[in-house]
Image: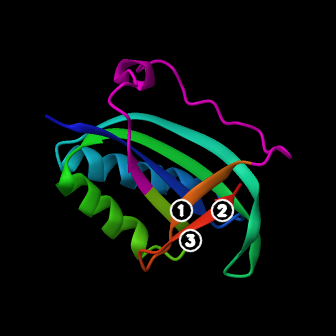
Amino acid sequence: MFSGYETLVISHPDISDEELQELIDKLKNVISRTNGESLKIDKWGKRKLVYKIKGLSKGFFLVVYFLGNQDVLQEIDRLLRFNERILRYQTVKIDKKLDIETLREKETQKTLEAPASGNEVIATVETAGGAQEDAAG
């Protein structure tokens, strides 16, 4: 049985729509290729960071919800770790109490892109080296 996971990705703030779509397609491909199931992808948009990462004070936030096993996690890590457009990322296991069906995207429903706002979101993210740091978006 697969577990539910969410991956928060902070990419370069100047990422183009084509690069973003390519990243999303690669993530979906990796998840399906390793027998996982992509549930939902939320584009949070550009957000201000609490501290600079690689000299940048903003980042583009993306959250991917999926079902998978250790193979899926390793492949996602491999995909994101060596991508120079990715500033930070972290994958966490979703609580079993959370209803996975509520995260499941309908085939006909498109992911809504959240407009960039001044709201601050604080998240713990994993650096490429594996250390955890607090970041806000």
Q: Where does the magenta region start and end?
A: 91-120
- In the image as oriented, which residue stretches furthest toward the right? 118
Q: Residue at x 32, y 30 (%)?
A: 96
Mark 2 burial class by Cα count in 10 Å: few <14, some 14-19, many 20+? many
Q: Residue at x 74, y 63 (%)?
A: 49
Name the element at disc 3: loop
Q: Which residue is mark 3?
A: 85
Residue 51, percent from left and from top: 75, 71
Judged left or right of residue 21, residue 80 is left
At label 1, the amino acid type is Val
Could you tell which of marks 3 and 2 lies nearer the N-terminus?
A: 3
Examine the rendered structure and indicate whether residue 95 appears above or below residue 63.
above
Residues at marks 1 and 2, CA–CA distance in whole angstroms:
7 Å
Q: Say which of marks 1 and 3 sits in front.
A: 1
Query: Residue at (71%, 54%) from the top-left corner?
Result: 137
Check the image and report above or below for 8 versus 135. above
Residue that numbered label 2 is attached to = 135
Quick check: is 49 in the magenta stretch? no
* Separation (CA) of disc 3 from disc 2: 17 Å
Residue at the disc numbered 1: 125
